Image: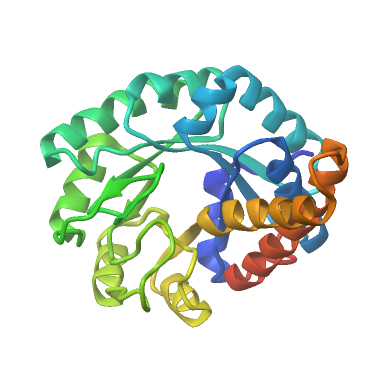
Amino acid sequence: MEKITIMEQLKRADEEHYAVPHFNYSDIWDMTAIVKAAEEMHSPVILAGVPKVTNALGMEVVGAAARAMAENARTPVYLHLDHSTDIQICKDACEENFSTVMIDGSKESLEKNIEMVKDVVEYAHPRGIFVEGEIGKIKGNTEESQYTEGDFLVQVKDAVQLVESTHADILAVGIGTAHGFYKGKPEINFQRLAEVNEALKLPLVLHGGTGIPEEDVRKAIRNGINKVNVGTIIKYTYLSSVQETLNRTGPTIHTIDLMFPAVEAIKEEVKRWIKVCMSDNKA
């Protein structure tokens, strides 16, 4: 369908106090579930693939499948490359006309991070593609990130320097969230988030959505978050459904009949997150 750009969508989210939900997929089945849920909830949505997925399936294959779904969807669907630490993979995604690409230099020095983001921006912007950077660190030990040290909090001056030096369009900020399941309640530094939001007039991203209480997600949105990333619970729901069906039927079931229940289960979880992000009926 015809749609506004992702940057226009994020600006609208900021003005109307909701967030655009971003969901990580593993293959065409959870991709299908995400789009179906978005259509049913009349919500914009971001389909996101990490390099582990795009490398395994092939960037061209992933891009073609996601584009076909986005073009045929009855709601705005955007394509995103998530958490790439490899500049070339970002450029490959640009060639497949992803809406946005993320170059994650957060584990590097600030100078190196700036250098990486600037390189991708200079390649992406002439092609009409927007770039997400990261400052501070998102904790966790998953395919999205492998950071488990203690110093994670974004520094406002570093965030300003990165954006001003690179002209990045979107910024993920380290405020205490983590990839994977949390052990205990996540401690989010809302004060620092508000400070970054005050200093920078661009969309901010909350990574590590799975496990954050609904009230904290919405508080983050009130303090400047315009995009919320959800991945772990999608994989968990997918595999739990497959396991449950196989336990009941055994491995003689047809693959299609195995996947349909998984699609329905994922779809319900995506719809729940759309409501958390308050993006239902915002398409």
Front residue of 240 and 152: 240
Give the position of the C terminus as an image quadrant.
Answer: bottom right
The image quadrant that residue 251 belongs to is top right
Side (left or right) of 165 relative to 70: left
Side (left or right) of 83 relative to 281: left
Q: Whole-percent x and y of residue 43?
A: 71, 58
Color theme of the render? rainbow
Give the position of the N terminus as an image quadrant.
Answer: top right
Q: Is residue 190 above or below residue 71?
A: below
Q: Is residue 58 above or below residue 184?
A: above
Instruction: Give the residue displayed 47% in from the left and 63% down from the top.
Output: 209
Instruction: Give the residue displayed 53% in from the left and 78% down from the top.
Output: 214
Q: Whole-percent x and y of residue 183?
A: 36, 72
Side (left or right) of 209 relative to 240: left
Q: Is residue 97 above or below residue 23?
A: above
Q: Whole-percent x and y of residue 14?
A: 50, 64
Q: Is residue 189 above or below residue 100?
A: below
Front residue of 210 and 280: 210
Q: Whole-percent x and y of residue 262?
A: 76, 52
